[in-house]
Amino acid sequence: MPKVVHTIAELHKILQPLWRKGEPVGFVPTMGALHAGHISLMKLSKAAGNVLTVVSVFVNPLQFAPGEDYDEYPRDLGGDVKVAREAVVDVVFAPSVAEMYPRGFVTWADQDKLTEKMCGEHRPGHFRGVLTVVLKLLNIVRPTHAYFGQKDYQQSVVIQRMVTDLNLEAKIHVCPIVREADGLAMSSRNAYLGPKHRIEALVLHQALVRAQELVAGGEKNVKKLHAEIKRIIGTAKSAKIDYIAIVHPDTLEDVNDVSGKTVFAVAARFGKTRLIDNVIVE
Ligand code: AMP
């Protein structure tokens, strides 16, 4: 059974002996409602030989814009602890909002450029909230290795940049997207989808696979690839596209043509559910 702790003091009691001995600690930050995508990160941490793996479960209010799904976001700590047990995780850190942001909290982490487009453009303040909580969590857990999913591609780039820019110690690992059998990228938000939207949501993966095939067949033209992705997503009646981005994997700048490693990233809403997905095309 993992130890479940709710305060930083309790967590530090567990971690201090490891820090002293310089033993590697693995860390998987999550917002809970754990699924196979999260489990893959926990398993990677275990397999990498970290002496102890910490999973945090914290729905971070700072990264939700007003009107987003902070209140509805699925919360099930009991279920999450069971999942963590199956993944043989050592510690679940589930702080309260007051533990993370006590009265008087006014300091934020922020970043230019990389956060200004894609999800940043459609979710004002989102990355400022993500960066702030991740910086705090990295300072609280002081992991040797931290594991993030490629599922949130822009987030992984933004976090790696912060770690470099602010000389943080943790080594960041970005792990492959885990999908349902039919291709839908696993997400805690998939739980919101009714049967109709669940089927329609498949267009995201289908569009990305099609783009990948076209590139493999020699297509380099960004406009054509963009149009094809848009067309396929558009076959789902309820889909409302937030963005289709065809970008450089490190700078997230739009590419002129698909000649080197390129990221295809999409975000769309199906009813009230906003989903994202991406592929890296070599
Ligand atoms: P979340 O709980 O949605 O904030 O996600 C916590 C971590 O799990 C993030 O680093 C996500 O990128 C990662 N993650 C979420 N879904 C998946 C997935 N389907 N495959 C791999 N990693 C994922």
Image (cartoon, grey):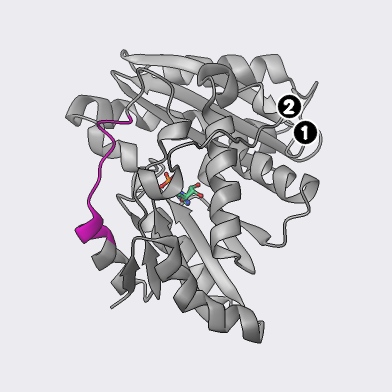
Front residue (pair 12, 147): 12
- In this rendering, position of residue 62 left or right of residue 92: right
Q: Which element type, helix, strand or loop, lies under badge 1?
A: loop
State the mark number for residue 112: 2
Front residue (pair 174, 92): 92
Residue 105 position (above or below residue 171): above
Q: Residues within 10 Å of mark 1 (few under 14, many from 20)?
A: some
| Quadrant assignment for the C terminus | top right
Q: Is residue 102 visible?
A: yes
Q: Residue at x 66, y 16 (%)?
A: 224
Q: Position of residue 61 (x, y in %)?
A: 40, 34
Front residue (pair 10, 225): 10
CA gap, disc 1 and disc 2: 12 Å
Any magenta on residue 76?
A: yes
Q: What is the three-letter code of the residue carrying label 1?
A: Thr
Range shown magenta: 70-80
Number of numbered discs overlaid on the protein picture: 2
Q: Position of residue 90 (x, y in %)?
A: 40, 76
Residue 50 position (above or below residue 57): below
Residue 90 position (above or below residue 116): below
| Quadrant assignment for the N terminus | bottom left
Which residue is tagged 1? 251
